[in-house]
């Protein structure tokens, strides 16, 4: 599934890598007079490095014309390629296998890289160098292990010095799908890491070949095969084998050279493995952040914990269980069942796809498949029971904002109750003592869950109808802020990278918001609810003032007042009555102009927190 623009590159790269490896395998085993170990080396390296592997194979090893392989592979740079291919095939296989396994085991990143280094080194030394090369190099397995130790150490140090920072920095970047072997992005990052590791390991391999320490890696068997085909003598082969190195200063490496190289490459290795710790939190494990994508611009430092990352991560579109039709509306009145005099409501939280505009689909945490959740209406004095079912991938609870309820029914997760786990249920039951405009919302990680859509209106009618002013129309206004970029929806929050770019009234941005129709002389009561999480929205009415009659569900009585702007902070409610005085289209909108745009784009004269009241004469 394409979640991010980079995914096109990832899939294309992985496809090219597989096709390239298939071609190299076919050509190596069908046409190329190469040693079997090197045939496999090139196939693996091409699988890991994709088009780069193919390029190396064609330019350095693929016989251009029959009988020319000996000549073709003789230059030192090609011998160096062969030596590096051989090294990388073993080391990278060990590193990648270890990376996949350690991710599943849940170790922190810093432990992962150490295990990866050890696995890569051992895999390269014990299997690729000593075991597979025994035929070529002669001698016992133990002799080969001893002989290969220093060359393998130098080469592996360089390989990991290049591969580790690429893996660490890209895995721990904002798209942490790269941490998890189940994600294609993981394999793409591994691939890039191998390319960089190869590049860093190449010079030392050229030197090792020139010094005769890794001689015969890729051409010996070829030449031996070729020469035996041509009935040439083995002595000739020995001479030929050193041909590549003959152009170089062919003195045996000194102890000082080897010691200095060992020291230098070890320094490179340590830098590659641990300098990234200055930039990212290497104590995080893949398991803790699997599949998460962070919002662009989020500040992530070495001290950012995994919990903070999960909190700000995008809602996962792959967990969407329902795609609401574009014209679907939220805040639909939910009729209760009456069981033994109790009004019973069922609320079910799940992840859905929701249109805030015709072409803009957010991934929302929704209740009963709508944003906002269904409107609950009951009467003062009613006993209500609310069955909450959690189909989200994280624990959740419901809170009845502003209501006087028994404490254990109040909903704050980990305070008055255990959060309802994924797939779990909880039943809330209480008597409505108050009346007025209230709302419900998640009270477990509300910064995330409410921001992603877990809220809905709660309207309680007074016991005596006379207690509430009568108007011709009534309209509930629920405000919300969204952060939606490149197809992913992040919980909007006042944090770097978390600022919202879309704003909705009842789950829709203007021009998709409702238009209210009235006649001159009629009145409308707006029940404005601060269901949003961050800003204070100064909601402004055109066409003359409204009368504020209640705040936070409490009637203002004689303290009611007239205004044309009311600041609606998170959690606040205002009931206002507006009389239609003049015909025409009158705006009701937030007075922070950025909040009346859709991702800073104006559509049909506005956007976001805007709705039109169309007054007929
Ligand atoms: Cu606003």
Image: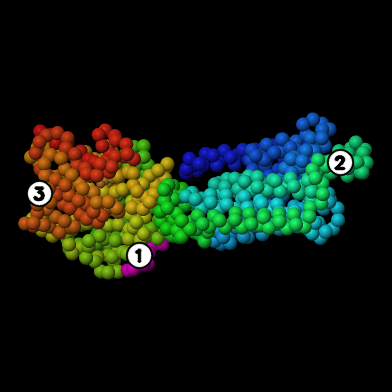
Please tell me in which quadrant of the rendered image residue 557 appears.
Answer: bottom left
Q: Is residue 583 visible?
A: yes
Helix, strand or loop at label 2? It is helix
Q: Is residue 101 visible?
A: no
Highlighted magenta segment, given as a residue range: 414-421
Helix, strand or loop at label 3? It is strand
Decide if residue 478 is on the left or right side of residue 192: left
Q: Nearer the viewer, mark 1 or mark 3?
A: 3
Q: Is residue 418 magenta?
A: yes
Q: Which mark is residue 413?
A: 1
Q: Earlier in the sequence, mark 2 or mark 3?
A: 2
Q: Which residue is mark 3?
A: 562
Residue 607 rendering spot, x and y as whole percentages = 28, 39
How packed mark 2 is, by other alpha carbons closer than 10 Å (few <14, some 14-19, many 20 or more), is: many
Decide if residue 348 is on the left or right side of residue 268: left
| Residue at image coords 38%, 44% | 484
Q: Please report contact status of discs 2 and 3: CB closer than 8 Å, yes or no.
A: no
CA–CA distance in space, label 1 to label 2: 76 Å
**Viewer-proximal residue among 158 and 373:** 158
Q: Nearer the viewer, mark 2 or mark 3?
A: 2
Q: Which residue is mark 2?
A: 240
Residue 590 rendering spot, x and y as whole percentages = 22, 44
| Residue at image coords 80%, 45% | 249
Helix, strand or loop at label 1? It is loop
């Amino acid at each position: 599934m394409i979640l991010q623009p980079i995914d096109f590159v990832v899939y294309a790269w992985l496809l090219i890598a597989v096709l390239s490896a298939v071609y190299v395998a076919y050509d190596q085993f069908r046409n190329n007079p190469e040693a079997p170990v090197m045939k496999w080396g090139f196939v693996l390296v091409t699988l890991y490095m994709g088009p780069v592997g193919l390029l190396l194979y064609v330019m350095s090893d693929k016989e251009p014309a029959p009988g020319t392989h000996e000549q073709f592979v003789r230059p030192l740079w090609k011998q160096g390629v062969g030596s590096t291919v051989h090294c990388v095939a073993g080391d990278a296989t060990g590193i990648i296998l270890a990376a996949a396994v350690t991710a599943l085991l849940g170790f922190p990143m810093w432990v992962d890289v150490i295990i990866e280094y050890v696995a890569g080194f051992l895999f390269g030394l014990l299997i690729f160098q000593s075991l597979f090369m025994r035929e070529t190099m002669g001698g016992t397995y133990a002799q080969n292990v001893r002989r290969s130790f220093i060359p393998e150490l130098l080469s592996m140090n360089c390989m990991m010095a290049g591969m580790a920072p690429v893996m660490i920095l890209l895995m721990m970047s904002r798209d942490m799908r790269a941490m998890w072997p189940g994600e294609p992005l993981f394999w793409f990052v591994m691939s890039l890491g191998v390319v960089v590791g190869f590049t860093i390991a190449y010079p030392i391999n050229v030197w090792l070949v020139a010094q005769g320490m890794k001689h015969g890696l890729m051409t010996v068997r070829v030449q031996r095969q070729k020469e035996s085909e041509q009935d040439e003598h083995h002595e000739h082969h020995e001479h030929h084998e050193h041909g590549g190195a003959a152009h170089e200063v062919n003195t045996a490496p000194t102890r000082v050279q080897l010691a200095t190289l060992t020291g230098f490459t070890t320094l490179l290795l340590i830098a590659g493995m641990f300098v990234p710790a200055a930039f990212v939190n290497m104590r995080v494990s893949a398991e803790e952040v699997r599949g998460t994508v962070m919002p662009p611009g989020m500040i992530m430092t070495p001290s950012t914990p995994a919990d903070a990352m999960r909190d700000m991560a995008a809602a996962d579109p792959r967990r969407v269980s329902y795609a609401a039709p574009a014209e679907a509306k939220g805040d639909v009145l939910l009729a209760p069942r009456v069981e033994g005099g109790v009004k019973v409501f069922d609320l079910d939280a799940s992840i859905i796809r929701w249109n805030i505009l015709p072409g803009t689909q957010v991934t929302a945490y929704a209740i009963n498949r709508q944003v906002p959740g269904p409107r609950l209406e009951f009467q003062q004095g009613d006993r209500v029971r609310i069955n909450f079912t959690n189909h989200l991938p994280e624990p959740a609870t419901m809170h009845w904002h502003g209501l006087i309820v028994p404490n254990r029914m109040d909903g704050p997760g980990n305070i008055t109750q255990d959060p309802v786990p994924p797939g779990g249920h909880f039943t809330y039951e209480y008597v409505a003592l108050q009346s007025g405009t209230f709302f419900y919302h998640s009270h477990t990680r509300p910064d995330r869950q409410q921001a992603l859509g877990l809220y809905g209106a709660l309207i309680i009618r007074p016991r005596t109808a006379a207690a509430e002013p009568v108007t011709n129309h009534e309209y509930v206004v629920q405000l919300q802020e969204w952060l939606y970029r490149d197809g992913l929806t992040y919980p909007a929050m006042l944090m770097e990278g978390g600022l919202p770019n879309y704003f909705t009234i009842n789950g829709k941005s203007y021009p998709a918001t409702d238009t209210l129709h009235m006649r001159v002389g009629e009145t409308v009561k707006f029940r404005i609810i601060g269901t949003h999480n961050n800003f204070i929205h100064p909601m402004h009415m055109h066409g003359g003032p409204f009368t504020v009659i209640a705040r936070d569900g409490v009637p203002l009585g004689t303290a009611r007042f007239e205004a044309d702007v009311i600041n609606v902070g998170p959690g606040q409610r205002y009931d206002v009555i507006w009389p239609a005085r003049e015909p025409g289209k009158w705006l009701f909108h937030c007075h922070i102009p950025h909040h009346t745009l859709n991702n800073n784009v104006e559509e049909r004269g506005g956007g976001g927190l805007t709705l039109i009241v169309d007054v007929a004469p």
